[in-house]
Amino acid sequence: MKVMFALLLSVGLSGCTAGDWVDAAGGIMQAKDKQEKEARNKRIKAANKAAGY
């Protein structure tokens, strides 16, 4: 219960709205997806190069 109260208090005092939190979370997820896609493409290119393509 104390943790929930602290979380609510910090969110309330930060001045951020729920929309701000959603936007921030969306940005983080997009960055993570982009990083994973780039890493996957690098692995595919390395595998193709090793296979002689």
Image: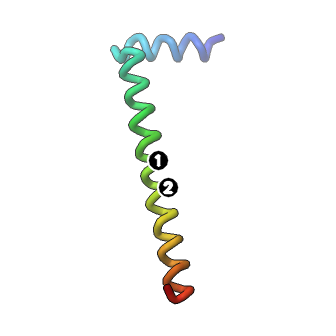
Vertical order, 11 against 22 (above or below): above
What is the CA distance from the residue labelled 1 to the residue labelled 2?
6 Å
Q: Residue 3: x and y, percent?
A: 60, 17
Question: Is mark 1 in CB contact (under 8 Å) with mark 2?
Answer: yes
Quarter of the rendering containing residue 12: top left
Q: Residue furthest bottom?
A: 52
Quarter of the rendering containing residue 16: top left
Q: Is residue 20 left or right of residue 41?
A: left
Judged from the image, the secondary structure of the residue bearing numbered disc 1 is: helix
> Neighbour class for label 1 at 10 Å: few (<14), some, many (≥20)?
few
Vertical order, 40 against 13 (above or below): below
Q: Residue furthest right?
A: 1
* Residue occupying image coordinates x 42% and y 16%: 18
Q: Is residue 31 left or right of residue 52?
A: left
The residue that disc 1 covers is: 32
Which three-letter amino acid code belongs to the residue tagged 1?
Lys
* Residue occupying image coordinates x 45% and y 16%: 10
Res 36 label: 2
| Viewer-side residue, 25 vs 5 | 25
